[in-house]
Image (cartoon, rainbow, N blue to C red):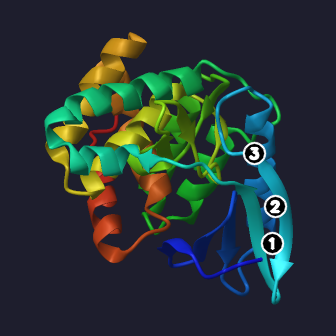
Amino acid sequence: MNLTNVIAERPTKTVYRDGNRCIKLFVEGYSKANILNEALNQARIEETGLPIPKLLEVTTIDGRWAIVSEYIEGKTLQQLMDENPEKKQEYLEQLVDIQVEIQSKTCPMLNKLKDKMNSKISQTQLDATTRYELHVRLDGMPKHNKVCHGDFNPSNVIITEDGKWYVIDWAHATQGNASADAARTYLLFCLSGEYDTAKKYLDLFCMKSDTARQYVQKWMPIVAASQSVKGNERERELLLHWVNVVDYE
């Protein structure tokens, strides 16, 4: 494999292009279970018929795990927003349309979103009372089985030259409540300091999915707490703010 053309770098992985293949090479010692789960998620999402890069193989390169997928030529929605700020609203609408399309699918073999969030809340450094309240709130939320991306943002949507879209990075995919996934996207915009975009996104999501804003907001502390387990100190501080501003009943 040719590992000279780097297209993305993250703390735990480097992504390369090798012709029509995309190679995601993880750091040494990265969890084998997490890598196999990501590949399994991708394979299962492929079966829903959603446009995503095809999984080609899972392998090792010099002792490091790698996921090899089809390479999709195009630009991310984030790149298009940055290059064409006057079209940002248009791209934001497209982002929401794609998310609603994803959430129209079911995939019964995916892990359950509620199970994942319960586990994450238990791992937080929040006090026992707050953790208990979050677990109770999560348990009381309606149980759905929609496909949830788990990290849905403009950088994970690729638009090809002929206008087709593909969604990448299914490591955090689950089945569950669509509003939890929307709350996650909203918080991702906030973590990037794009509060105005976050508000516009949420307005669009609620309108296009016919969802009450208050319903998505009920998910905010649960999602923020579950996401606070990872990330840097600044992100954790902001996420925990979302947990603490809630008045529990």
Q: Is residue 176 left or right of residue 228?
A: right
Q: Is residue 136 above or below residue 156?
A: above
- Neighbours of disc 2 within 10 Å: few (<14), some (14-19), many (20+): some
Decide which of 216, 165 is in the foreground and name it.
165
Mark nearest the camera among 3 and 1 is 3
Cα separation between marks 1 and 2:
6 Å
Q: Nearer the viewer, residue 58 or 240?
A: 58
Q: Which residue is mark 2?
A: 36
Q: Amino acid at mark 3?
A: Lys
Name the residue rendered at 31%, 13% in the picture.
Answer: 207
Picture residue at 76% right of the left edge, 62% below the top: 68
- Residue for badge 1: 32
Q: Which of the pair 213/199 is nearer the observer?
A: 199
Q: Are marks 3 and 1 in contact (CB under 8 Å)?
A: no
Depicted 109 relative to depicted 26: above or below: above
The residue singled out by tag 3 in the image is: 54
Q: Are marks 1 and 2 in contact (CB under 8 Å)?
A: yes
Q: Position of residue 14 (x, y in %)?
A: 58, 76
User: In the image, residue 139 lies at what x, y percent?
Assistant: 58, 33
